[in-house]
Amino acid sequence: MDGYVRRERPPLELLDDEPVGECSDAEVDEEELNSFLMGDLLATPEPRRRRKLSFADKLMRRLMKKNKTAKRQTLKTIGTQRKKKKRRTAAHPSKLTPQLEKFMQEAMNHYLNGSFEEAIKILKEVVRRAPGLHDPFHLLGVIYQEEYGDIVTATGYYLLAAHLVQTDLELWRRIGEMSQEIGNVDQAIYCFKKCLKTNEGDINEEVTFALAMCHLEKNDHHNAIKRLYTLFELHPDDALLLNELSKSLMAIGDKETLLAVLCTYYGESKDIETAKLVCQLHNSLKLYTECIEFAESVAETLRVKLVKLPLDILASYVIAALYVDMDVSKELEAIWQTEQVDPAMLYAIATALTNRCQETAIRWFRRGYNENDKTTIDLLLAEQAIHMARCIVIVEKDHEMARRILQHILEREPANSEVIILLADILVQAGKHSEADELLVRLTTTDLNRLKMIQKPIDAEERKRELTDLEATVQDLLDMCFSDENFRIPPCLLAKTCGKQETPEFKAIAQKVNTWINRFLRVVNDCELDTERTYKKLSSTKINRPHTEDSSVTDNIDINKETSKNYSFLRTKKDLGLQSVEDIIGNRMSASALSLPSGWGNYEHLLVNAASLMAIVRRCREGVQLLEIITNNKKRYKSAVDIAKRKQLLATVEELSYRMYNSTTKNNAAELSCFGGMFKIALGHARGELAKQGSLNTYGTLLSTGALAKSACISLSSSAEKDTLLENRSWVTRQLLHNPQNFDLLMLAGHFCTMSGNWPFAIEEYKRALIQRPNDQVTALCLATSYFNSLSSRAVEDSKKYILLGMTFLQYSFQLRRNHTENHPCEAVFIAECEYNMARATHFLNLLHLAVPLYERCIKTIRDAEDKFEGIQNDDAIECPCIICSMSRRNARTYPHSVTGLAGGKYVWEYERKQILRAAAYNLYLIYTMNKNTVQAANVAAHHIQWN
């Protein structure tokens, strides 16, 4: 087997020992000849099945594979020997002998006389005798094409003829066209490639275009682009070429090349439709400056002003200008005044406006969006929907509208992870936690990995330019926002209901603030990603260690030190060319100005100002997210440089984001999360105070204010803060196991039981709390209330006992209240409060004959106090604890941060007196109305109730 070499026999080889003579019909099998000449070309459409290998064949193949090296050596030895003369085959042209010429003449005569069968027989005999002669194949192709209409067979004969005469370019082109007709695209491509150039060496444009069309039929856009681009370079003003080339470039997503092609075509034709596409592509590629320059050049070409440009070009110009912070108010007004504007154009403008003014962006979006029109919904892109949903939630607090917008996008793109995450976040804010969980289940590992991808950093020069401008303009914005107390918003104590927040003046200021915040968030978020970028680089860097065994221990120690130095955090960050906010701000300072604050101090000051600006325009959620990112990144910051200043920055960030902190004036300033109503974040940090300081004052204050306190009035299962409350209820229960005598924990546990409607458990908790502090009036009142409410529980067997205990503790709370307020300047208000509580208890027990006189006595007590009231002389100022006033106290210009009229009983007289009077009068009005005593009800309503 080692010396055996298999020799393949050529398919069209004529043996020398075969007699050459005339061939009769009986001697020639037409099907066999066709198969012999053309192989699979004329074979039946059914594929020939491969013979099943026997065991011997398999063994033989295995042995031959093992001896592959020996075979190669044998082949090399044989190749060096004298080669035998190759026999003539169809691959070589044959000479036309006189006998063959006679056969060809007879075949031609039969063809001209219409005897096609006889002509075919003679031609096949000629082929058998001289397979390298192209004339018989060509004539056979003509007969089958023109007389029999068999294009497939004719194409096969033409193909054989073309291979024998390679220079017949026209024949190759003809075969390619015929192959296109029969759908054999691969054969057409093969033929067209043979005749891409003419005999003179020039490009055959028709063939090149036909070849490109064949590539398009096979969806081979890359090769199609290669051919079409060659033609486009010759004819840059050809619209047909531009159309086909644009389709292929869009199919593969090569927008850069498409932009260059369109610009070239516009330069030749000055076509306006092409100019529109160029502008759209510029914006799609975020080449905003180039888009502006191109639109201006179009205006110069048309000799018109920018506002007179075609609407599509004008809209693209406006979008690009908005992204580069240009003033395009005139252009925007021109588009707004246009009657019929494409919704897609309005969406694009609205998305660009989100970086400048979110209120204006929503106005543009609502003009194009119609929930009842499916066309406008289909034109909204996912990215645009995400931007607008965020704006609607931030500005209008309309979670339902944002949910519907994203739901439409999710129906169209069910696998869009960004839409899923944002929609889940909105559902959580709306209290629909189960729906949010169902959405998040759709996320895959690929989606989560994609979300972890780190974007490319902003250019260093752009970072410096942006941060410098942000620092330079922030003080002016602070002056505009906080100098006037009328611009303050709740929960700031300085907030007033004068409606000045709705004036055009404040809206203009808010627009500037939002623009500043957008720029600030963009730059700072990108800078904070530097920590992730550095750690990613460190984790991917492979440290090369020496592999030689003869190195000494000392050398290894030195190498490890060098490795630690070279691949340290700061060095890697520097190698990547990354400069964070503290680096940029610190580098701007003079090296000699050692007394000035460092970059960390300036960064801290900038964060305080930014947090207050976010609070005034109600963007606290974004601020808290940024502060959490900063906290996590700075805790991972591996450097011993400026460690004290970095810790100070971390403390300030935590103060801004989470807890209440003591300022230099020893007054508490509320956190950004509380100002924005994000109680879950605030409560999480407040719980930490128990471990650090052993105090739950902050925790209890948070639970008794805002949305959490409002949740006590409704069922816990339907509360929007359900998850937060359940989480904290579990935490309080666990803490009670460690501190069963803690008064604050006992009161919190009782409150949670009250919210859940577990009155027997609430009674037990309030009892334990009252044992700890017997003189606490609030605890006694809560215990009395729990006894009354437990009457509706089936677990109560003796209702009279519970009524008696409730009345007992209620009277006890009144006694404690009077003892505590007997020297208060508004003592009458507290007496009226006790009378109201007693009236409310009898009203709850349906003892209306007792409730009515008690309500009337409460009203009379307050009215008598009003007649005798001589005023309270106390102008002490109370420091507002909100984050805005905290910044005002820190700022060198000292904006208003305190309020008068709330100290020394003034708050009780101005607010609590009115509240007690209103509640007593309204309950009395309801009793009279229920008993159809309309005269008394009207009298109470007229004298004591102020209707809105």
Image (cartoon, rainbow, N blue to C red):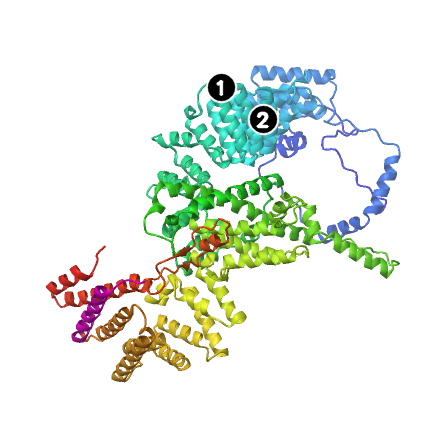
Residue 23: image location, x then y, percent: 68, 25
Q: Are the residues flagged by discs 2 and 1 in contact, CB closer than 8 Å?
A: no
SS state under label 1? helix
Confirm whether residue 584 shows in the render. yes
The residue lying toward the viewer, choosing from 589 and 716, is 589
Judging by the rendered image, the residue that carries numbered circle 2 is 228
Which quarter shows the C terminus?
Answer: bottom left
Side (left or right) of 44 relative to 322: right
Which numbered disc flags the more N-terminal residue, 2 or 1?
2
Residue 198: image location, x then y, percent: 65, 18
Please state which amino acid type lies under the numbered disc 2: Leu
Side (left or right) of 130 relative to 799: right
Q: Which mark is residue 301?
A: 1
Give the magenta-colored segment's residue range. 848-872
SS state under label 2? helix
Side (left or right) of 120 relative to 695: right
